Amino acid sequence: MKGKGILIVVPVIVALLLAFGGVYTVDEREQVVVTQFGKAIGEPKKEPGLYFKIPFIQYANRFPKNLQEWDGDPGQIPTLDKTFIWVDTFARWKIVDPLAFFQTVNNVMGALGRLDDIIDPAVRNFITSYPLIETVRRTNRELDTFEVGLEQEEMKDKRRLGTVKVGREKISKGIMEQAQPKLAKFGIELVDVKIKRLNYVEEVQRSVFGRMIAERKQIAEKFRSEGKGEARKIEGEKEREMKLITSEAYKTAQEIKGKGDATATKIYAEAYGRDPDFYSFVNTLDMYRETLDKETSLILSTDTEFFKYLKGYTGKK
């Protein structure tokens, strides 16, 4: 019984292996090339579905149908006006002929190597054929930037970077048109090529930064000189205002003082007119208080007018 069971199970297992080995599926994201002993047979399977092959003899080679990405290595390239820049590009591609793709590059890694060999020279060829402004700008639209410290006319001069005749988009399109025919024999369609990043090389960067620093220093010096001039103007106005205020105050003080002196003189005159002797007596006493103290010594004759009110004074009440 056991022997009969084994005889039944083994053929079933073999049949299942043959069945599963002879059936494969293709989804909408891939395409398949069937090979037999390393050689492609039949037409590539591009439509999704269930397919059959000879088990253990034929092999299903799967290739992506969707867009693939290529990222180039940044490189130093001189422009037509001898400006060295770093250029970094990327591309999108897809496999449109899986049979040719299998027979030429065999796999995605091999395809990326071919893309390197074809797209990089095309990029270098176009970058070196045009001035820097053509690679950087798309149109002649006036720049809407504003730089502090520059007058309007100076800004207009700085914005005149040159005239764009081709532009960045047409350069990218030209790179793709030049590279596409060389990739067609590999079953590859180049969908798009773009310049991802542009930058000056280190030597040019130092020169540009040095020029920018010099310009900023010039603008800063302009601000300083204008500030110093404005400060001198403010200080001059302050001095003028102070002198004007001082002179006005002095004039007002003198007027008040003159009025006070006139009023005092009038009062003194009225007092003197009422009692000249008393007025003379009070003034003489004031003079004694202001001129005589403990350390004062005077030698005067007895008939001097200065001591006329002290004559006959004995110190007794």
Image: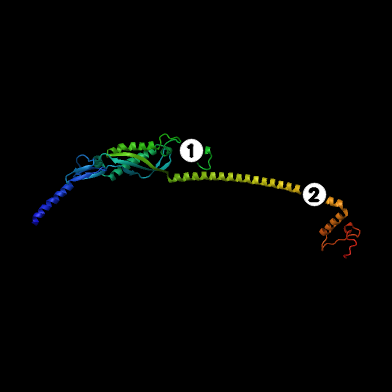
Q: Return the mark for residue 9.
A: none
Q: Quadrant of the C terminus?
A: bottom right
Amino acid, disc 1: Arg
Q: Label 1 neighbourhood size at 10 Å, few (<14), some (14-19), many (20+)?
A: some
Q: Nearer the viewer, residue 17 or 76?
A: 17
Q: Residue at x 73, y 47 (%)?
A: 252
Residue 17, position in %: x, y? 16, 49
Side (left or right) of 268 relative to 168: right
Residue 82, position in %: x, y? 43, 39
Q: Label 2 neighbourhood size at 10 Å, few (<14), some (14-19), many (20+)?
A: few
The relative height of residue 304 versus residue 148 in the rendered view (above or below) is below
Q: Nearer the viewer, residue 281 or 45?
A: 281
Amino acid, disc 2: Thr
Side (left or right) of 212 relative to 273: left
Side (left or right) of 262 relative to 89: right
Q: Nearer the viewer, residue 114 or 91?
A: 91
The mark closer to the camera, 1 or 2, is 2
Q: Return the mark for residue 159.
A: 1
Residue 51, position in %: x, y? 19, 43
Q: Quadrant of residue 287?
A: bottom right
The relative height of residue 294 versus residue 180 in the rendered view (above or below) is below
The relative height of residue 265 versus residue 182 in the rendered view (above or below) is below
The alpha-carbon separation of the residues under discs 1 and 2 comes to 77 Å
What SS does tag 1 mark?
Answer: helix
The residue singled out by tag 2 in the image is 263
Is label 1 in contact with label 2 (beta carbons under 8 Å)? no
Question: Which residue of the protein is positioned furthest toward the bottom in this rendering?
Answer: 316
Question: Which residue of the protein is positioned furthest toward the top in this rendering?
Answer: 165
Residue 259, position in %: x, y? 78, 48
- One can see residue 86 in this view: no
